[in-house]
Image: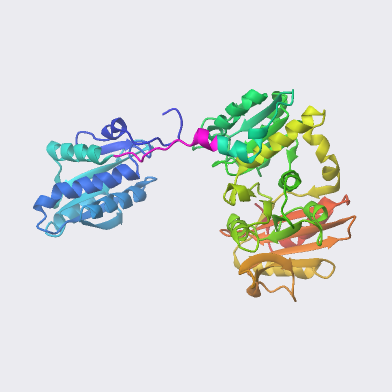
Amino acid sequence: MDNHTPTENSHASVEACFKRDDMRGIWPFELNAEVARLTGRAMAELLAANADGKMEIVLGHDARLGSFDLLTAFAHGVEEAGGRCTSIGLASTEQVYYACGRYADRFAGGAMVTASHNPRDYNGLKMMRSGAVPFSAEDLAFIRLRVLQLLEPVPVMPVGEEFAEYMLHLAGFDAWKPLGCVLKIVVMAGNGVGAVAFRPIAKQLEVFGLDTVFVEDTPDGTFPRGVPNPLLPDFNKRLAEAVKENKADLGIGFDGDADRAGFVDHTGTPVEASHILALVSQRKLAACKIRKPVVLRNICGSQLLKHLFPAGGDVELIDLPVGHGQFKRLMRHEAFSDRVVFAGEHSGHYFHPDFFCADSGMLTALHLIAQTWQWKAVGETLADKLVEWRNTYHWSGELNYDLKSREDIQATIVDVANEFGGSMSRYEIRKDEELDLNRCMPAVGGYDATKLAAPDLKLVEDNGDQGWWFCLRPSGNEPKLRLNVETWNRGDLADLTGRVIAVLKKHGATEG
């Protein structure tokens, strides 16, 4: 294997799993869940003739990674052929022999998921008939041939070129005129699928003068350079280095499945997600004829958006809880479906109503490419356009703090609310009963998580020309709190962030 990305099952890779007495193959590249399912089905068909209507197979598995999943898939295959399975769980192979021999009147056969003494990258199957009788060469030949007969690849419908044309159309490139200058960009896929999806787009833009440099573009599921995540400093550092090394105008970094994008300017400086939301919103609003258009951000969005789109202005800014489902539901709601122009989260998810109300890092990147290209044509850069925002708004980034238990989370948030709530305006996640949607709205009464749709806490001090806010919200999976802090026209971001962290540490929080 050239990399660690599973490939489609082929007859050659499946045949390689069948050995003299059993099955062994590299997991999950040769012996995977689909192969195990088909093997279970074939074994049940083989034994059915002598089962006297009782097709039950006893199963066990060893401690290898993937063994339980292979056992489950094998059992599903047996069930497809009309049989059923009983598992003795984590076991030694001879325990399966014992069950198959001791209860020969019950079990038509047995199977053990194991690769015995093979290296850890392998897994396998040892199969037997009732009474722990080993499979013959003819038995294994039947199963091999039957699995190959059943092995039908999922139909493939290439959409790369079609997808590229559609995205370029949405971004306005079908009406694009050459600007007389080359725009050089770096696309970093982090060994995910971003380069696979973006190459056809880049190819079609070459005619206009787009020069694209791809880095970390080979898909590799082990992610040898680290998890591709535009929020991680290491990821952005590598993107910045590639941009500066190639003297590019823009850097684009995609996460593993390429629905999320992060950006750096020509100096290698990361562009905050809220700045992307603001830039693309302005670009889309300039071509918009909607009355009272809507822009969406989540609870961690920059105050820049509030200042660009103030309450009572021509654009309605709506705050939502964190989570792509929250955005998609509101964008499709009959009260907003014809007014939403753009939406974005601090994590790099951007949502486009013209792209099925779905998130698209690709389409967002194309809008930013077009805007950066237009600026370059008149001698300006993305970095030039961001100077004022960067000098005014200062964000901590998302900071994570671990607590000992989930019970500590609520006590910690309550303590923070009491510590800062007297001098700051509080916002909370409540259900908008009229819309039947959760929204981020001004608080009503004291902080009480039991009365909220989500326990997220946001406190804001906005004096117009200066102020600060912070948001504290729990992880959905771990005893962890996520903290975001932003100041504007104030030089004390570190001090204010430290004040919040000090309260967290009273409860034993540690940086995570």
108, above or below 250, in the image:
below
497, above or below 267, in the image:
below
Which quadrant of the view contains residue 179?
A: top right
Residue in front for this viewpoint, 222 or 326 = 326
Q: At 23% from the left edge and 48% from the top edge, which residue is drawn?
A: 41
Q: At 26% from the left edge and 45% from the top edge, which residue is drawn?
A: 38
Q: Quadrant of the N terminus?
A: top left
Residue in front for this viewpoint, 273 or 114 = 273
Which quadrant of the view contains residue 144?
A: top left
451, above or below 118, in the image:
below
Span highlighted in magenta in the image:
152-164
Residue 268 visible: no
Residue in front for this viewpoint, 257 or 210 = 210
Q: Main secondary structure of the magenta part?
A: loop
Is 154 included in the stretch rendered in magenta? yes
Residue 280 visible: yes
Rendered location of residue 55, percent (x, y):
16, 56
137 horizontally vs 313: left or right: left
Q: At 69% from the left edge and 26% from the top edge, which residue is drawn?
A: 184
Rendered location of residue 336, percent (x, y):
65, 60
Total numbered badges shown on the rendered structure = 0
